[in-house]
Image (cartoon, coloured by chain):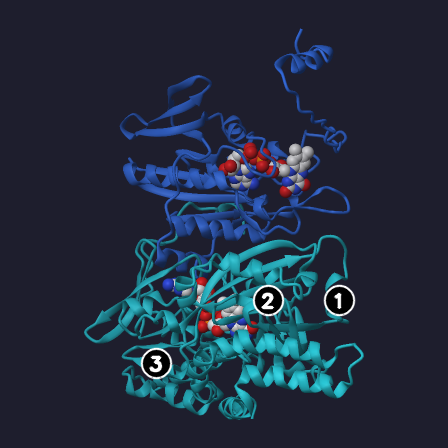
Chain colours: A cyan, B blue
Amino acid sequence: MTGTETETQTQDTHEPNYDEAFDVIVVGAGLAGSAAAVTMAKRGLEVLLIERGSSPGAKNVFGGVLYTPTIRELVDFESAPLERYVAEKRFSMLSHDDETALSLRPGEWNHDPHNDSYTVLRGEFDEWFAQQAVEAGATLVTETTVTGLVRDGPQIVGVETDRPDGTIRAPYVVLAEGGNSLVSEGADLKDTESRENVAVAVKEVLEFPERDGVIEDRFRLVGDAGVAYQYFGEGAVGDAFGGGFIYTNADTISVGAAYRLEDAATQKQSPEETLNLFKTHPAVAPLVRDARTVEYSAKTIPEGGAESIPDLVHDGAVIVGDAAGLVLNNGVHLEGTNMAVESGYHAGRAIATATERGRRDADVLGAYPADLEQSFVVQNLQRYAWMQEAVEADRDLLFEALPRAFADASTEYFRMDRQPKESHAENAKRTVLDALGGWTGAAKLALRYRKVVT
Amino acid sequence: MTWTIVVGVKQVPDADEVGIDPDTGRLDRANAPAVMNPPDRNALEAALELRDTVGGSVLVITMGPPNATIVLEEAIAMGCDDAVLVSDRAFAGSDTWPTSLTLARAAETLEADVVLCGEETTDSSTGQVPPGIAAHNGWAQLTYAEELEPQPDEGRLVARRDVEGGYELVAAQLPVVVAVAYGEFDPRPAGLHRKIFAENDFEPREWTAADLDIEDEVGLDVSPTAVGTMETVEPVERRSELVDSVNALLEPLEETEVVG
Ligand SMILES: Cc1cc2nc3c(=O)[nH]c(=O)nc-3n(C[C@H](O)[C@H](O)[C@H](O)COP(=O)(O)OP(=O)(O)OC[C@H]3O[C@@H](n4cnc5c(N)ncnc54)[C@H](O)[C@@H]3O)c2cc1C
Ligand SMILES: Cc1cc2nc3c(=O)[nH]c(=O)nc-3n(C[C@H](O)[C@H](O)[C@H](O)COP(=O)(O)OP(=O)(O)OC[C@H]3O[C@@H](n4cnc5c(N)ncnc54)[C@H](O)[C@@H]3O)c2cc1C
């Protein structure tokens, strides 16, 4: 450029307008939203991805393991910011002061693809994932909260945001706003979940300032290996229905508890108290000793299961991820990340096909719920639908009597005294059987829960 | 008559993200993401309010590296009409003298009636640039402006200036350079469509030192400021002691001659 070209004429930047400039608006750049966005952008759609946080993931409370079988297919996974792969899963029952645990360290998990289970920090991961959508051609707008939907008759034709000049129209809207789905509820696309079907989760990220290597030493880790510990019983969440967890990140650990909102209200158990109780349990305290809290956060998790899934498709809109209640949370499994990505992917495909055919009615989007039903998402949720109720019915037994009985039984079984082992074994067996209601009770219980693992 | 209002904005390391390098004990600015100097948002708001009353256009300029474009986009999102990135390797090592010369020339080229700046930056915080622009161009200057009252018919801008113990009202003939008091003029949020436009479709104009005919007047060689030595000051050890009575407090204070 030469000096004479520094003319003062200005570009015509007045009142830009993007109504109908995009094929689809995605509300929320979490896992489900970015999965939908990247899927559609790769099919050539113009995608607007709206996120309320200062960056995607900035507000995400998640303590855990990201399950990646679908993400791996969608994007260049090599560049993903992962903390550690899960080399050990540990399920632990805590009574007031006992622990009985089962630890699994299959050798296969140490090898690529590490059972597609990695701990991540969502602040970093979500930003990266949204960036993959942007690189595929999507447009990301942050610091913008969607406050409502725009309708033309029954048809959803756009969104309203909290910004001035904040309404924007597009043929389709993907609602990927997570569990606290104010937009979907406000637009009557789904009911507000009842308290029994919502868990409250609290999580702390802890670091060990004293020295390096604390995590490796305490959790018996080398390299990128990490652990996912899950805890049940009264020592984990008191009288509430839920569990505690510890996950290792690269230089920090995530410690948290999740339990039913209903219990938070009726048992008067505050999230802070519950988490403190868990952290001071004799089996947990040594793992978090001398740690410094770097982050504290709380959030809700939908756990209504298959029955709580709302209508996924509306005229001009679809609901995906946690907003659609797609979380499996039954004690053994806590899986929402894989379901969020899978649902975003199927929804994105359906909208891409509809756009290519130039149609926008609910019928043409029917491919999304149909595909989802065939996928592991709905199949898994249905498979475990019974479990929530069963566990609730057996709650005292499972969370209080049994953890205590197992601890007492092991105390008996391994007791060092001058009695023969046979009598120890007999005592141990009796302790457990008493708790279970004799052989009949045990058989019934085994029958009721066999589907958890078979 | 409408006004051409030019706003200078600078990118600075995000103060929230500036850490201390544990090895050297120095501030680690290199790893902090660049953001708009917060006081410049107040200048932008003041400019947009002037445009709202007087009419005209708001043009935003930054002298900085190519990635400084993001602060220009933010200004466009807020409502500015156009933006210029003044960028050149020749600027490397410039202190406030050549920086304000460059901005002065750019303001002149843009035929500015009013130049608005922030009070100071959060990284160098000299506050010298706005008066420097005024001095290079021989224009009037209004610093620490808390309120602005445009008088377009008289070709005048009146500022309420924050001064020790009160304020004063000062009227300046155009063209004038204004440094806006930090925290005054609460910045407006960006409109949705403008934000999308600014971040995705807007391209600023780019000027080099040669475009402004100042290639021999900028850079390290012509920067009069010389940094002597830098000293890291260790915090003084403090002693804490509890006393039971006023007299017990007075004694040691007298001893150390804090009170006579
Ligand atoms: C403590 C905790 C631990 C968990 N542990 C595990 C685990 O170990 N493994 C697992 O698989 N799952 C786990 N989950 C569940 C998992 O986090 C969720 O299932 C998953 O994050 C759902 O993804 P999503 O994209 O649907 O929603 P989210 O990840 O919640 O993303 C929603 C996004 O939308 C944005 N947003 C919301 N409303 C608006 C709006 N109005 N306008 C604009 N943007 C908006 C949010 O800022 C957010 O970025 C856990 C959840 C919690 C809370
Ligand atoms: C000896 C010395 C050497 C330096 N060497 C370098 C160097 O090598 N590289 C380097 O990057 N910096 C260097 N600097 C810093 C640089 O010169 C200053 O940051 C710059 O001159 C602006 O000064 P300031 O930040 O104190 O602005 P202030 O005077 O505090 O800023 C007040 C207002 O002026 C406006 N303004 C200031 N700077 C700009 C700008 N660049 N574009 C548009 N508007 C602006 C803004 O509205 C701002 O709010 C050096 C400084 C010194 C003292």
Q: Is residue B160 above or below residue A76?
A: above
Q: Residue at x 55, y 50 (%)?
A: B68
Taking A38 as reference, is B244 left or right? right
- Dot 2 falls on a residue whose secondary structure is loop
Task: Choose between B259 and A258: the one closer to the eye.
Answer: A258
Residue at the outermost front position = A419
Task: Choose between A61 and A239: the one closer to the eye.
Answer: A239
Are the residues flagged by discs 3 and 2 from a single subunit?
yes
- In the rendered image, residue A402, in percent from the top left (x then y), is placed at 57, 78
1 vs 3, front mark = 1
Q: Residues within 10 Å of mark 1 (few under 14, many from 20)?
A: some
How far separated are the C-alphas under marks 1 and 2?
28 Å
- Dot 1 falls on a residue whose secondary structure is helix
Q: Is residue B131 above or below residue A50?
A: above
Residue identifier under label 3:
A312
- Tag 3: residue type? Leu
- In the rendered image, residue A115, in percent from the top left (x then y), is placed at 64, 83
3 vs 2, front mark = 2
Are the residues flagged by discs 1 and 2 from a single subunit?
yes
What chain letter is assigned to the residue under label 2?
Answer: A
Residue identifier under label 2:
A96
- Tag 2: residue type? His
Q: Is mark 2 within 8 Å of ligand 1?
A: no
Residue identifier under label 1:
A216
- In the rendered image, residue A85, in percent from the top left (x then y), is placed at 67, 75
Are the residues flagged by discs 1 and 3 from a single subunit?
yes
Disc nearer the start of the sequence (3/2)? 2
Quadrant holding the C terminus of chain A: bottom right
